[in-house]
Image (cartoon, helix red, strand yellow):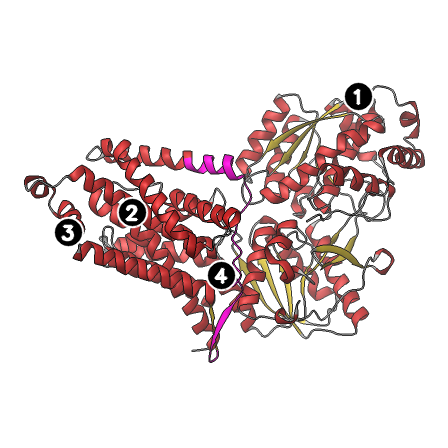
Amino acid sequence: MSVDLVNQIITGLLTGLVYSLLALGLSVIFGVVRVVNFAHGEMTALAMYGAWALSTYLDLDPLVGMPVVVVVMFAAGYLLQRGLVDSFVGKPEHMQFILMVSLAIIMVNSSLLGFGPDAHGIQVSYGFDTYEVGPLLIDKVRLLAAGASLAISLMLMAFFRLTLMGKAIRACADNLVGAKVIGLDVKRLYAVTFGIGTACVGAAGALLSMLIDVMPPTGPELTLLAFIIVIVGGLGSMTGALLGGMLIGVSEVLAGYFLMPSMKSMFSFAILILVLVLRPQGLLGAKR
Amino acid sequence: MSESRSPIINRRGFVAAGAAGAVALGMGGSIGRARAAQPVKVGLLLPLSGSLAREGQSCKRGAEVTPALLADLGMPVQLMIADTETNIDTARTRAEKLIADGAQVLIGAFESAQTLAVAQVCEQRGVPLVINIAAAPNITEQGFKTVFRNFPTAPRLVGEGLSLMKDLFKASGVTPSKAVFMHNNDTFGSAMAGAVGKIFPTLDMPFAIAETISYDGAARDLAVEVGKAKATGADLLILVAHGEDSIKVIREMVKQRFEPKAIVSPGSPGMYEVQFYKTLGKYADYSMTNLPWINPKSKMSQALLAAFAKAYPDALFEMNVGYTFEAILIAADAAKRAGSPEPKALLEVLPATNITDHVMIGGAITFDAKGQNNNTRSATIQNFGGKPLVVLPAEAAEAKPVFPVPGWQQRG
């Protein structure tokens, strides 16, 4: 295997890890609240704008500004669930779809109004740095973003497995009636879950802002990407989202390297179709 | 950061220059009389949002300073600006809407696919379309009677772009051995790639193209594309890109330490735009683009520059501005010669356009039977300190070309 190819696979793996965090939020929200967030990418784009604003006006590195973005996005998600989405929980899917798509359209146009059509990118002082490991060149920004993404993903998994609130949320997801019978405040837990999902979006947005520029059309692209990842990994599965992200990241690189770079996205869709045909529940999703 | 050069000529000077030019080309009588003519309603279609927003906004800036300058020449213009949203269907519907709202001539639309859609509308409605920027050759190969393009076709752009590379090697005494060709796979990029494939073998170029890499300009990053280019071992990168993707390419080149002798575009936007300089800083320097450029020695371009610098002190005065100005100039000149701004009258006189005093490098603006201006000329511009300077041809050069360029780590 050539050094160039190994370099590219590492790049794909690192990028895929950041994608995973983005998809994790979608998977968490669907897994518990049973609402498919069609505004997921648009929320990510807003988080990217937030990271950009913190970097531009307060000179905060996206890694430093990320906690601020995460807290704001958690609050926004919590309030959105309590104020709007909650009344659509359990309603027919087409109603949820229209609600979330409407929100997505409002977000895209708001960002167009607020930030204009131009791309907004963050220039960090180490933006062009690479680590040299033998013959390999590892992009510093990607490595930091992927490391942060992996750490946040593991913390999130630990939260759901080890904390009382995490277990309560899982109880809501596994057996809603049972959760209500034992007296869990389901509405609050749903809002917390939605908040956690949007907080993931906030973290992913802050990290992505180091890798790609944000502009209004970025949102819908990221929504599509998140859907591909969670469907490949398994909707509702957190480890599936992690695996799906890395798989899509690496497959895009391999498709670009061995076939044609302009076929990168097409290859992701091909994997999606393959998974839907051979294993509709996703690679790590449970059969329902 | 101000990218504009200092004003050299004011509006009064512009009138004198314009009048002199007009006399020379036989339209002086009407300018001399300078009567209050009826303004021609110009519908300007540009991608003001979407992926080409940056370029569209640049064209718009050029358009917005134009009416005052042309009014001084007795050529009143009323602009009606519409956003195509970088979308072909939107371009088509906005063209219909502009015509319905009374536009007597349309100008646009920066990108070839959108322009083609607008051309079809204009042909159906009998309204002239003056193309400011769009290079796909098929636009003027379809027998349209209402389309006039003051911009080189992709083959012409590429032919001149490649020829200028030979001039560069000759001037520097260094010749690369192998090139890799990367291009955006949109309509413009594909047309340029087609032209390179066709023209390159005919020009006896002193290097071979090791590989052609087509990429999606909207891709989130171009790491694998650049990695693939680096793997070819090429010592020259030929790049056809737009603003966004040219930044992505250079960013990855720095990270992956891909250091060819030069990065040269045979005629695409991207590497001379303000955002390119702002985002890449020192890494933007020394990139070269071979393309039609503003003639720094034309009095009309100096006047346009003065007006532009006053209106937009932080914006770059570049090709998009010049060609959009010229497209409006062509429409206004036609209205003046026709004595009427009505579409039918404009269509009668547009084929006989002959404007010798204008802003871009090249001969008089005239149109052949297909509505194509064949008198455009390209120059080589190279970035120095966040500014594009003409380095070739020698007679128009503002600086000497630097080739091979310094490595990424050898810059400031």
The residue positioned farthest toward the bottom in the image shown: A134
Q: State which tag comes first along the sequence, 4 or 2.
A: 2
Question: Which region is colored magenta?
Answer: A107-135
The chain letter for the residue carrying disc 3 is A
Q: CA distance from mark 2 to mark 1?
A: 63 Å
Q: Is residue B367 visible?
A: no
Percent x, y for residue B139? 66, 42
> Which SS class for mark 3?
helix
Which amino acid type is shown beneath numbered disc 3?
Leu
Q: Chain for mark 1? A: B
Q: Which mark is residue B340?
A: 1
Nearer mark to the viewer, of 2 and 1: 2
Q: Which mark is residue A261?
A: 4
Q: Which residue is mark 2?
A: A197
Judged left or right of residue B360, residue B104 is left
User: Circle 3: is it few (<14), some (14-19), or many (20+) Cα within 10 Å?
Assistant: few
> What residue do we see at 40% from left, 58% from top?
A267
* Horizontal arrangement in the rendering, residue A148 relative to residue B331 (left or right): left
Q: Which residue is mark 3?
A: A164
